[in-house]
Amino acid sequence: MKILVFVKQVPDTDDVKLDPKTGNLRRDGVKSMMNPMDANAIEAALQLREKHGGSVCVVTMGLPMATEVQKKALGMGCDEAYLLSDRPFGGADTLATSYTLAKAAEKIGGYDLLLFGRLATDGDTAQTGPAVAAQLGIPQISLASSIAVEDGWVYCDRDLGDTVQRVRAKLPAVVTVNGGINKPRYATPINIMRAQKKPRTTWTAADLGCDMTKIGTPGSPSSTKKVFEPEKRNTDTQYLTGSPEDMARALADLLENEHLL
Amino acid sequence: MKSDYQGIWVFAEQENGKLHPTVLELLAKSKELQKHNGEKITAVLLGADVSALADTLFSYGADAVLLCENEALRSYSARPYQKALTQLSEKYRPSIILYGATPLGRDLAPRVMVSLDTGLTADAIDLGFDEDGVFYQTTPGYGGKILAHIVILERRPQMATVHAQICSPIEPIADASGELIVEKLNIEPDGDYEVLETRSAEKSGESLAEAKVVVAGGRGVKTEEDLAMLRELADLLGGQLASSRPLVDNGMLPHDRQIGQSGATVSPDLMLNIAISGSVQYQLGMQKAKCIVAINQSEDAPIYDIAHIGAVTDYKKLVPALIAKIKARKQ
């Protein structure tokens, strides 16, 4: 079985600020990391490979520094890594991204299963997985909290909040996984070092044979017109003071007054 | 031509003949948009044996209902629904299509985005027209510390999935009527996708929506021991343990414990927020609580914008002290 896992590099923080002069995000000094749920997707792929054999390829679109994410993926146990990196890919929204990722899937070829994290922590869209499925014209299962493959079908539980749906889709298919689906294994430094020998390929837009009007900024119908900080609301917050002990006493008084004890 | 596209569409999500509550909210929001652009509001109703819902849609603000009944649309699966919406949109050319940011809406809309080759904004918390008359969708980024206006300038339709509860449904209009458009589409069921079973999610506690006291932990809760401390506090107060998104994303708590974005909406008497920064989505899920207490080391955390009581300190010091005080007073 050939599994492709799509992995994104995201900022390792929620603590972003706007540059008051330019209105742009201040990215200086912000470290990046693998999107957490993408590690769950890799873990799911590795477990499926352990059971059914085959290979796991990890695909990343991004700047050359995204190779750090690839190293981690290979260190976890993926067999091969592809980096889609080219200036014209920049500024892609989810439509352009899904086109580019689908072109890479086609070029790799022979895939049975495409795995994604349910969403990425930077954009929060959860759109890329289903959009890639649409680009390739294959079925999808989003929000998977379990995954198994049998007789050419992928079986998942979908976590819908109040209900859980048991569904199946015929391979090849896209599955997007929740954070709770498994505990990703750790990529030990020694394994990351050993994984240096694994094959790594970088592809440009020309390598993928992309229609240049469908990638990057020209291929992105959506754009950001304005970025701003949320308005502060005017709740009069009463701040507790003193030591944690003093604060605890004040809180306990409050709970008692509200008859919550 | 952009001007060939007219009208606001609301995807009337239904399951087993029941409309999803977000549909009525989207109709109300469309009414606000209509004040600006004057375009017709059409609810697009896909399914089988669902025509009875048309009257509800009229009474909550739809000028028209586009009804497409087909056996292949009886229960949701992505590809037949994608095909139906794509065909309808290509025929009628709306300028805007809105979907609830529900599990179904977020499964379907990205596929329609691809087949219509247009833009789709995810999980908008507001919609409107800016000073240039451009339709924008507001989305939070980076945990809600930053908001962005996303626009789809050149392509049509302009699509968005929209967060639940960003506005209230309008008062239903008695005996409302409107234009019913019936479409027959040639859609086949998807033989490559099958729902085998739907069951109630196992609940890891009582429903959050009913809880009088909620103790919620956020990103700052790193270990099982810290979480156990929060659970002890919740138990002492006869309340429920809950969380913002990070603890569910990393698997420390099940999905039914999540407040905000795609999670529960709560309105307890006491809402204790521990190590939660308070994203816009999270605040939408708990802002109706009577007394909001925030414990967060970072004094510029957005949670303090809506907290009644704030404690800018390390919860790992405060919570054990609080637990000790409560135990002492209960004796």
Image (spheres, coloured by chain):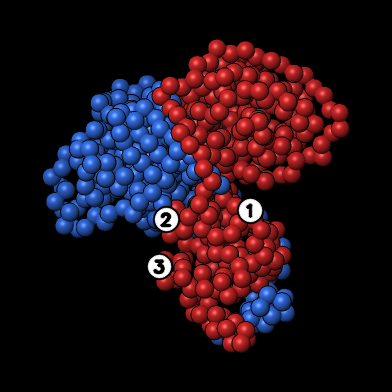
Chain colours: A blue, B red
Label 1: which residue? B265
Label 1 Cα neighbours within 10 Å, binned few <14 / some 14-19 / many ≥20: many
Q: Is residue A17 left or right of residue B168?
A: left
Q: Residue B50 — which label?
A: none
Nearer to me, A178 or A162: A162
**Cβ atoms at labels 2 and 1 below 8 Å apart:** no
- Classify mark 2: residues with Cα within 10 Å, few (<14), some (14-19) or many (20+): some
Q: Which residue is mark 2?
A: B251
Measuring from the top left, give residue A222's x and y in whole percent. Answer: 53, 33
Callout 2, which amino acid? Gly
The numbered dot on residue B223 is 3
Query: Which residue is painted at 49% across and 20% down in the image?
Result: B189
Which amino acid type is marked by label 1? Thr
Q: Is residue A190 visible?
A: yes
Nearer to the camera, A152 or B225: A152
Q: Position of residue B227 (x, y in %)?
A: 46, 68
